[in-house]
Amino acid sequence: MEHTYQLTGMTCSSCEAKVKKALESVAGVISADVSKDALSANIRVEKHIPLTIFQNVLEAKYQISNEVVESEEIKRSWLETYTPILLIFFYITLVTILVQLRNDSFDAMMWMRHFMAGFFLVFSFFKFLNLKGFAESYVMYDVLAKKIPAWAYLYAFVEFGLGIAFLIDFNPILTNAFTLVVMTISIIGVLQSVLNKQKIQCACLGAVFNLPMSTVTIIEDGIMILMSAAMLVTLMG
């Protein structure tokens, strides 16, 4: 795996050499290329390494920050970059629509409930594949996870629980209300990251796919917010 990070504090070639040596001393690092001009560090690793570990081996004047997710994405088209998430949405939509064919008429409430069940179960699955990697990415932008790091780990279980709740139609009002709150909190950090043009990895599919944070993530969270709000209004109307 290869990751590019922002790295400040280097002022000369000696700094570059010092930082390079420090980063390559970390267990699991294959090589590190640093540039004082580009203010970056390109690090090849055998496995995911938390950003805090890199920072700990550097002197205080050198600051390594959010991963720059652009080297590969710039070379790829928008469709190529987001194929995984688009395919997931396509499959969930197709399956939930096919379920409706068994009804005499299209039941919008049932369709949304099944769609959200599929969404949360599938997305939590990818997070569980590398829970630690997901949590380390999520805590970089989620407003709640930044204050309570444990939330980054708990979030995957919350998604799984919501998926089950929607699937079995457990207490619809409570389930939709909780979903509305959770997804609203989630979208705040996403909006901040996108508006501030932070080039970081989106954790929506865990650490399995290297997807950049973008308006696609906003749309994804927005759909869940709109569906849960619509079902709440209908249920309470």
Image (spheres, rainbow, N blue to C red):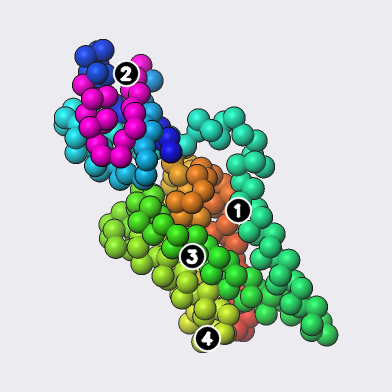
Q: Residue at x 34, y 51 (%)?
A: 136
Instruction: Sort mark 3 into few (<14), some (14-19) or many (20+) by Cα contacts within 10 Å.
Output: many
* Distance between the alpha carbons at the discs numbered 3 and 1: 13 Å
Judged left or right of residue 107, residue 137 is: left
- The circle drawn on residue 124 is 3
Q: Helix, strand or loop at disc 2?
A: loop
Instruction: Sort mark 2 into few (<14), some (14-19) or many (20+) by Cα contacts within 10 Å.
Output: some
Position of residue 46 relative to residue 136, above or below, is above
Q: Name the residue under label 1.
A: 85
Q: Residue at x 24, y 18 (%)?
A: 17
Closer to the N terminus: mark 2 or mark 4?
Answer: 2
Name the quadrant containing residue 36: top left
Q: Mark 2 points at which residue?
A: 36
* Distance between the alpha carbons at the discs numbered 2 and 4: 55 Å
* Distance between the alpha carbons at the discs numbered 2 and 3: 39 Å
The disc labelled 4 sits on which kind of residue? Phe
Asked if labels 4 and 1 touch by Cβ distance under 8 angstroms, the answer is no
Asked if residue 233 lies in the magenta stretch, the reply is no
Position of residue 172 relative to residue 158, above or below, is below
The disc labelled 1 sits on which kind of residue? Ile
